[in-house]
Amino acid sequence: MFASACGAAARALTWVDRDNRETMNEHIPFGKPAIVGRELEYIAQAIAQGTIAGGGPFMKRCEAWLEEALPARRALLAHSCTAALEMAAILSGVGPGDEVIMPSFTFSAPATAFVLRGATPVFVDIRADTLNIDETLIEAAITPRTRAIVPVHYAGLACEMDPILAIAERHGLLVIEDAAQAHLSHYKGRPLGTLGHMGCLSFHETKNIVSGEGGALLINDPRFFDRAEIIREKGTDRSRFFRGQVDKYTWQDIGSSYCPGEIVSAFLYAQFEHADAICIRRRALYDQYRAGLAGLAAIAIPNATGAEANGHIFWLLLRDEPTRARLIAHLAGENINAVFHYVPLHSAPAGLRFGRVAGEALPVTEGVSARLLRLPLYLEMTDADVARVVASVGRFFGRNA
Ligand SMILES: *Cc1c(COP(=O)(O)O)cnc(C)c1O
């Protein structure tokens, strides 16, 4: 149902036809959020309906969309992916002294969510091809204090979930997917975020589908359904009260305020209506980069196609850090904004304080983070924009553009 509605939308959307505009000297930003449909209309509708707090009709429509379109067993909208990770950390029951396995080559959010519970992130190295946690190193990092594994699907490409789920099963661990970058990506046909016990999505403006700030907790293990609602509502059973299941609502548990407001949900629902079209376009831009840069011996690019990932990030690996700095400067000189990515968590101030490295060192993580560059990729980018970036990278390496 959603797919066919979105297919029609894709044909109607304007960015598809904009490749011929004059672009030669225009600034190409690294990223840029786009309005794709009825965002403003739905916001006006949310205001007119007289309720703009969390838990309103647009929040429920977004959750129903996720449950049906992915599909997911249960989707709880949150005000960010970080909030969803915090909810998952509370639900996982980890506490001081417990350990949670995750990559170091990632954003602070998955680590800080568990550190807030008093747990210790244990950082495992990544694979050199996918830049995702190296599943063959996970088992050696497990100790009697390990409680959970947090696979992070970098650039929308799936971690090796079958072996990870098998390891978790063998050791009685929870799997909480950080699918912040992986909305509408799949692993062997199954939507990312729905393979572990829980999964977390982000709708931050830098992601594929956006609401400024925004996120969702996907819950696949029914054990967590009821408590998750209470945690999201400041520790109260307010959700049950609104469904008429209790006659008053009271303080039941720990929790916080994790609901998005209705204006944010209204914006997000308008984006969901064009989810397929957004993904199709981003994947095409990503594949154009792959095709354009494939012959360049001086760089490594992802093996995965746009269809295998979700067109979230197009990265390339340079020979070394100085080459990366020179390429960034070269692109900036041509009005193109390319950016590096993570300072590995294990080497960051808070990582040194709160986490530890599994084994001796994380050589792939350190090598990749110093050499990785992300090229501009956003919905309104044209084919001509991508061609211009490809030509500029080619010129840097002395290839005729
Ligand atoms: C963006 C991101 C987050 C955080 O998402 P927010 O919605 O901004 O809280 C978490 N993990 C990863 C891997 C991300 O890329």
Image (cartoon, grey):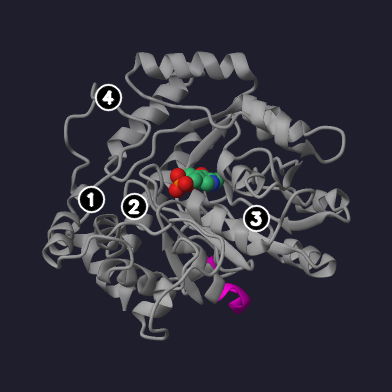
Magenta span covers which residues? 218-225
Q: In this view, does 107 lie above or below 13?
A: above
User: Which mark is drawn over residue 16?
Assistant: 1
Residue type, label 3: Cys
Lower position in the chain sequence, tag 4 or tag 2: 4
Q: Residue at x 20, y 65 (%)?
A: 51
Residue 115 locus on image (x, y percent): 66, 44
Lower position in the chain sequence, tag 4 or tag 1: 1
Residue type, label 2: Arg
Lower position in the chain sequence, tag 2 or tag 1: 1
Q: Nearer the viewer, mark 1 or mark 3?
A: 3
Confirm or deny contact between disc 3 and disc 4 (CB under 8 A).
Answer: no
Which residue is label 2 attached to? 281
Lower position in the chain sequence, tag 3 or tag 4: 4
Which residue is label 3 attached to? 159
Confirm or deny contact between disc 2 and disc 1 (CB under 8 A).
Answer: yes
Q: Nearer the viewer, mark 3 or mark 4?
A: 3
Q: What element carries label 3?
A: loop
Q: Is residue 153 above or below residue 224?
A: above
Residue 223 sits inside the magenta stretch: yes
Q: Could you tell me if residue 72 is visible in this image?
A: no
Of the 4 image quadrants, the one containing the C terminus is: top left
Q: Residue at x 59, y 60 (%)?
A: 88
Residue 316 locus on image (x, y percent): 55, 33
User: Which mark is drawn over residue 27?
Assistant: 4
Q: Could you tell me if residue 211 is visible in this image?
A: yes
Q: What element carries label 4?
A: loop
Q: Give the Cα distance between marks 3 and 4.
A: 34 Å
Whether residue 222 sits left or right of residue 18 in the image: it is right
